[in-house]
Image: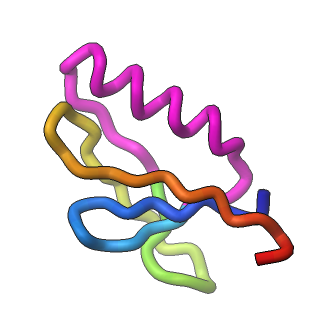
């Protein structure tokens, strides 16, 4: 997996160096416990610029695994 794209509240972020299933499990656990938590992501492309997005029930989030061939 080259990277993971995250669509969150209509904006795109990315994560690299992690497994897509691991990220999905982290999100599922955060939403299931109903205790808000933060997910570290990158804003934009290229140089890393950290952002933290809030994980809680009712927030739209999509996880897209991007292969090195895409």
Residue 18 coordinates in the image, percent (x, y): 69, 46
Is residue 60 shown left or right of residue 20? Answer: left
Residue at 60% in and 82% down: 47
Q: Nearer the viewer, residue 46 or 60?
A: 60
Q: How is the image coloured?
A: rainbow
Q: Position of residue 40 (x, y in %)?
A: 45, 50
Q: Quadrant of residue 51?
A: bottom left
User: Which residue is painted at 76% across and 77% down in the image?
Assistant: 70
Furthest toward the right, the residue is 69
Residue at 18% of width from left, 32% of height from top?
57
Apparent side of residue 16 relative to residue 54 in the rendered image (left or right): right
Q: Is residue 50 above or below residue 38?
A: below
Please tell me which residue is depicted at 51% across the width and 36% down the height of the picture: 24
Quadrant for the N terminus in the image: bottom right
15 left or right, relative to 11:
right
Q: Quadrant of residue 7?
A: bottom left
Q: From this viewpoint, which residue is outermost toward the bottom?
A: 46
> Does the magenta-highlighted stretch encompass residue 54?
no
- Residue range in magenta is 15-40
Residue 20 location, x and y as percent?
64, 44
* Residue 16 picture quarter: bottom right
- The verdict on residue 37 being magenta is yes
Give the camera-side residue of 49 and 60: 60
Number of marks drawn = 0
Furthest toward the top, the residue is 33
């Amino acid at each position: 997996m080259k990277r993971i794209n995250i669509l969150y509240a209509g904006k795109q972020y990315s994560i690299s160096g992690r497994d897509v299933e691991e990220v999905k499990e982290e999100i599922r656990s955060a939403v299931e416990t109903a205790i808000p938590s933060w997910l570290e992501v990158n804003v934009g492309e290229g140089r890393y610029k950290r952002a933290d997005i809030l994980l809680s029930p009712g927030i739209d989030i999509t996880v897209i695994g991007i292969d090195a061939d895409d």
